[in-house]
């Protein structure tokens, strides 16, 4: 029942965002993806049923016909798994939403969801994930570059990091998002990191 209710809320949110942001995604430069600019109302709609959310507009132009999206999980800098891997056909402009929501306080279970809206259709993938307990510090962030080229392979769009350090996490640097291969050592500063990644084909 809770799973069905979550998806109903998620679809309503997506339809609301698409109705408001349809023109925004069309204004994104061809062959790029960018963080969406949300209104206060849209942010309020997302904050209700989700703990964290990231919204991106993309313009695949005529060249790209498919998008693959997934979440990578790292522990102490080492890749330990991939969640929510999803591929879907796309046409021109669209929107992607990545969100997390706690579904069980007792065992610290959360749900990771990725939705892609394009050409009046929505594709969604989700998976349960047991999060670090509440005494871990959390920091999240997203790629702040405007008009990220989708010609790049395996783009990093967003991150959620957990740390048991008393100093607390600072978040991944902009350099990490621009050149992940040269900055993978940043992940060693955290107990657990989730990275949202995508590639266009």
Image: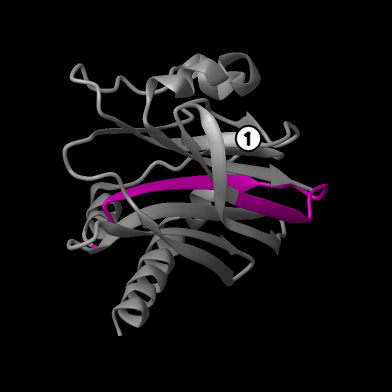
Q: Where is residue 164 drawn, in percent x and y?
A: 25, 28
Q: Give the range drawn in magenta.
A: 49-69
Q: Residue at x 29, y 22 (%)?
A: 169
Q: Which residue is drawn at 56% across and 36% down?
A: 79
Question: Magenta segment: does it hold 67?
Answer: yes
Tell me which corner region of the image, top left, top right, bottom left or bottom right, holds residue 129: bottom left
Please name the residue shown 24% across and 22% down the image: 165
Q: Position of residue 56 (x, y in %)?
A: 50, 45
Specify the farthest residue to the bottom.
1
Q: How is the image coloured?
A: one colour
Task: Say which residue label 1 marks.
Answer: 155
> How many numbered discs sit on the rendered protein?
1
Whether residue 29 is visible, yes or no, is: no
Q: Nearer the viewer, residue 38 or 27?
A: 38
Q: In this view, does 14 lie above or below 144?
A: below
In the rendered view, would you say 136 is above or below 102? above
Check if residue 122 falls in the magenta segment.
no
Q: In which quarter of the image is residue 76?
A: top left
Q: Which of 145 and 199 is in front in this view?
A: 199
- Left or right of 121 on screen, residue 49: left
């Amino acid at each position: 029942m809770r799973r069905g209710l979550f998806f109903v809320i998620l679809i309503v949110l997506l339809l609301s965002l698409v109705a408001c942001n349809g023109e925004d995604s069309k204004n994104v430069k061809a062959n790029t993806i960018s963080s969406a600019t949300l209104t206060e109302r849209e942010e309020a709609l997302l904050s209700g049923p989700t703990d964290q959310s990231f919204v991106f507009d993309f313009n695949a132009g005529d060249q790209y016909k498919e998008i693959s999206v997934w979440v990578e999980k790292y522990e102490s800098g080492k890749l330990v798994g991939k969640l929510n891997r999803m591929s879907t056909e796309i046409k021109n402009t669209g929107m992607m939403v990545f969100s997390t929501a706690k579904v069980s306080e007792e065992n610290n279970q959360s749900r990771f969801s990725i939705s892609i809206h394009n050409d009046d259709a929505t594709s969604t993938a989700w998976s349960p994930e047991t999060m670090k307990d509440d005494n871990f510090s959390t920091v999240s962030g997203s790629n702040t570059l405007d008009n990220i080229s989708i010609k790049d392979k395996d783009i990093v769009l967003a991150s959620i990091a957990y740390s048991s350090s008393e100093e607390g996490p600072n978040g991944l640097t902009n350099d990490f998002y621009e050149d992940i291969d040269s900055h993978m050592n940043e992940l060693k500063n955290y107990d657990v990191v989730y990275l949202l990644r995508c590639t266009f084909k």
